[in-house]
Image (cartoon, rainbow, N blue to C red):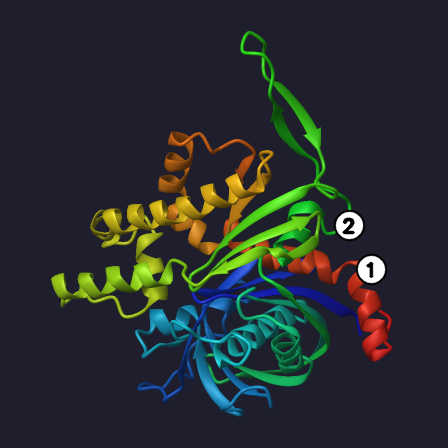
Amino acid sequence: MTTIKAGIDAGNNGTKFNIEGQEPFMIPAVYSEYLGDLINKMDLEEVEADKLTNNLDVTIISESILLSNTRFIVGQKVLDDKLEAIEMEKKSNKATDDVPLITALAGLATDAIRRNPGQDDIKQSYDVGAALPIGSINKESAAKYEQRFIGTHIVKFHHPNGTVITVTITIEFCKCLPEGAAAAWGVVYDEKGKPIKRKIEIEVAKDQEPKIETITYDDKSLLHFDIGAGTTEIVVTKGVSFNPNLSEPRGYGTKQTILEIVKRWNLVYPRKTIDSIVEFNEIYFDSEHPRHSTLKEFAVQFIRQLATKFSSDVINKIDEMKDDPFVFIYGGGAILIKSDLEKILKHKDRLKNVVFINDPMYVNSRGLLVYVSSPRFQQLKEQKVGVSN
C-alpha cells in the first residue's frame, strides 16, 4: 500500500490540508453531534466525490478523541444545516483539543474515498506533518500531538441515501513543527525539494532604473509573520532552520476582534445573528452573500484598528532585525487585514522586501507537505519506527 504524504494545519477557523497529488482544501473547524434526521432520506443520491468535504457526516472510531464511535456532522455542513456548532475555545490547546483531530480525520477520509472510487471498505496509509503555535509547543506537547495522530483510526462516511463507506486510516508517522517554522519549508523549497526562485528589487541610484534579481532563500535570514485566528507567530529562520531565540509568539490573532464584531453585530441585528467565527468568515469573504456588504461596512473600524496593532509588531521586529530582512506575511488572519496592513506599512516606508504570500491560508499546510516529503522526515521516520517508504 502506498503511503500518502499530508500536511495538516489545524487552525481556530479551519483545518487546512495539502495532500500529495491533490488540490489544497479547508474544512471549517466546527462539528456537531448527529441527532438524527427529521425526514426519510432513502431516496436521495450519494454525495459526489468533489462535494465530500462540504457534506461531512461521519462516525469516527479513534482512541485519540473523547467521543470515540460517535457520529458527527463536520465543517461546512454544520453551517449549511444551521446546526449547533462546537468550535475551539479562545485559549484552546490544539495539542489536546478534539476539534483538530475530528476535522483532520474527516479530511483524510475524504481524500481516501477520492483515491478509491467505487469502494465501500477502504484502507489507506499516511505520513502527516502537523504544527502547533510557538507559544505552546515544546517536546512534551509536540510528542503528545504526534501520538494522537499516529496509529489506526476508522472513519465511516454516511451518504444521505444510507450508504456507508468505511475508511481505515493508518497514520504511520507524524512530526509536529512550530507554526511559521513549518511554513518556511514551503517558502524556501518546492514539493520536490528544490529551492524556489523569487525575484527581488535591488537598490540603485535614484537616476537609474530599478534592478530585478532572482534569488533563492535556502541560505537567507527570513522573518515570518504567521497571522492566525487565535495566535500570531513571529518566526525567524535561516532558510528552514528555526531560530527559537529570535522567534516570539503573540497571544492574539484575529479571533478576539471577530468575536467583538460578532457580539456588537448581534446586538444591532438580533434577527440576523452570527453564531460562530466560521459563519462570520462565510459572510465576510463571500461577496455574493446577502449580508456581505453590510458586515464589511460594519467591521471597517475594527479591522483597521487590528491592522494598526499588527503593524506595530511588524515594524518593531523589522527594526530589531536590521539590514532589511526578507519578510513574509501569511496565515488566514492575513487575508482579513492585508489591505489595511499594506497601506500602513507603505505609509511608514516599511514595505521593502515584504511579501504577502499568495494563498496565505495554506502556507503552513504546504510547508508541512514539503517537510513530510523531505529526506529529513524520512530519516526521522526510519529512526523512530524502522519503516522505509
* Secondary structure of residue under mark 1: helix
What's the mark number on residue 24?
none
Please name whichever residue, 241 or 267, is drawn nearer the observer in this view of the structure. 241
Q: In this figure, which residue is indicated by the disc labeled 2?
A: 193
Q: Picture coordinates of residue 344 (x, y %)? A: 37, 36
Q: Picture coordinates of residue 117 (x, y %)? A: 65, 70
Q: Residues within 10 Å of mark 1 (few under 14, many from 20)?
A: few
Res. 267 in view? yes
Q: Picture coordinates of residue 226 (x, y %)? A: 52, 54
For the point 29% across and 64% down, the residue is: 259
Q: In this figure, which residue is indicated by the disc labeled 1?
A: 375
Please name whichever residue, 106 or 97, is drawn nearer the observer in this view of the structure. 97
Q: Quadrant of residue 17?
A: bottom right
Q: Picture coordinates of residue 63 (x, y %)? A: 60, 90
Quarter of the image where the C terminus is located: bottom right
- From mark 1 to mark 2, how far is it between C-alphas? 9 Å
Q: Residues within 10 Å of mark 2 (few under 14, many from 20)?
A: some
Q: Is residue 21 above or below residue 138?
A: above
Res. 357 in view? no
